[in-house]
Amino acid sequence: MFDLETFSPKQIVAELDKYIIGQKKAKKAVAIALRNRVRRQKLDATMREEVAPKNIIMIGPTGVGKTEIARRLSKLCGAPFVKVEATKYTEVGYVGRDVESMVRDLMNVAINMVKAELREQVIREAETRTEEAILDILLPVVKSKPQQPHPDQMNQEAIPLIEVVDERTISTREKFRDMLRKGMLEDKEIDVSVSKKMMPSFEIFSGTNFEEMDLNLGGMAGIFGNNKKKKRKMTVRNARDVILNEEIDKLIDTDKAADIARERVQEMGIIFIDEIDKVAGKKSTSGVDVSREGVQRDILPIVEGSKVNTKYGMIDTAHILFIAAGAFHMSKPSDLIPELQGRFPIRVELEALSAEDFERILTQPENALIKQYKELLKTEEVILDFTDDAVKRLSYLAQEVNSKTENIGARRLHTVMEYLLEDVSFEANELAGQTIKITPAYIDEKLGNIIEDQDLSRYIL
Ligand SMILES: Nc1ncnc2c1ncn2[C@@H]1O[C@H](COP(=O)(O)OP(=O)(O)OP(=O)(O)O)[C@@H](O)[C@H]1O
Ligand SMILES: [Mg+2]
């Protein structure tokens, strides 16, 4: 993981450079916004309250890396991060679906992060307990009543059972422990009691939506869900994981996890709102636009800072960083309601990609398409060899198709590559051991006539 605390904006950009070609301005803005939050943490409490996050709108044509920047950011920044599509709140059937769910999702992400970290702290102890638990099942400790019950004791049932542990039991247990550790008991079947989540009755929730229902269910599980145990037969091998997870759950302090997660969401959380342009629109009274503006109005309080109820407690959204993105083909950022515009002070434009960018995108990023195809085919012992000229030619052709039909940015590379390698992919098992050299001539042979025929390329590429 990447430690934001120690990384300068330059280093954050360098990290993004590994995956995204160009788009310097957007990377820089994002890096500054992230760094500012680390800076803010170091201010004294009153000042810290005053510093609002510098929310960002990324504007740029389709397929130039807006979502990709967000996706990479989430992987590298170590802060709780969610990505939502603004349009999902306008979908028919979802009308009135509360936008607050984005905050709840963020909290869930944070909880999982924190739990994963706490897990590291308790795993040793949980493993020890798991071993003991399995031994207990393999060799039930004999419990019996004391030999001579106290004469006053009227109720026999009330006499506590005591564990009778003699030398022999101990040495057998140690023998089993040894066999267990050597993996000799893996296939033995044992009865394990596992928690069974119970579904409480549904009437309680009438009038609430699904999100809240989940919220209530979560809270309720601890009260009467988790206590239900059910016996299941399984091998020692499988039982180990099941028991381990239960032991970990028991050892992790849920309240503590929630506190840490809440703090992290409030101070470092990032919400990426994609497709924001789709909820912007010229003022109009038609139904769709009303609902679009409705979504903006719903989002506004969250972006401005409000309290959202989650199953882990109230979240204050005032310092969550929001990054919005949209192509803004049909609308402009100024079509967003003014209040919302004001909450996104930073605007960055992403540039359309050129043939040269395509060349780099095909080869340079750590997950570059050509690398991916090479690896895929290598699993069938087919070696793909792209000459430099071929990469140039492919990029040029992709750019051609983009300009003649529709500009879908780097997504074009996916369709072009897939088509180019269709035959190789199809026959790879018969080509094992061969090297396929991809040259400009090869490319022209496979793609030439499709690209010349605009109608064809409109359908195929
Ligand atoms: N600058 C870039 N560098 C590397 N890969 C890129 C770049 N731009 C786009 N891609 C690739 O193209 C694909 C689409 O990009 P992305 O999802 O970021 O588009 P977008 O800008 O969000 O478009 P839209 O407005 O349609 O949502 C991704 O698979 C991504 O890997
Ligand atoms: Mg996108």
Image (cartoon, rainbow, N blue to C red):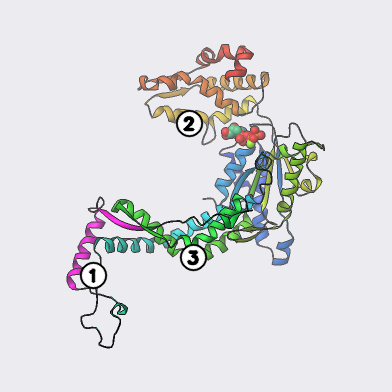
Please state the extent of the stretch shown in magenta in the rendering.
Answer: 164-193
Vertical comparison of 398 with 206: above or below = above
Q: Residue furthest left?
A: 168
Mark 1 / mark 2, whichever is N-terminal: 1
The kind of residue tagged 2 is Gln
The residue carrying mark 2 is 372
The residue carrying mark 1 is 142
The kind of residue tagged 1 is Val
Residue 256: percent from the left, percent from the top? 53, 65
Numbered disc in front, either 1 or 3: 1
Cα distance, mark 1 to mark 3?
Answer: 32 Å
Residue 198: percent from the left, percent from the top? 46, 56
Circle 1: element type: loop
The kind of residue tagged 3 is Asp
Residue 275: percent from the left, percent from the top? 68, 38
Circle 2: element type: helix
Residue 64 seen in render: no
Mark linked to residue 253: 3
Numbered disc in front, either 2 or 3: 3
Residues 242 and 231: in front is 231
Circle 1/circle 2 CB separation < 8 Å: no
Looking at the image, which residue is at 71% across and 49% down? 55
Q: Is residue 178 magenta?
A: yes
Q: Residues within 10 Å of mark 3 (few under 14, many from 20)?
A: few
Q: Is residue 4 magenta?
A: no
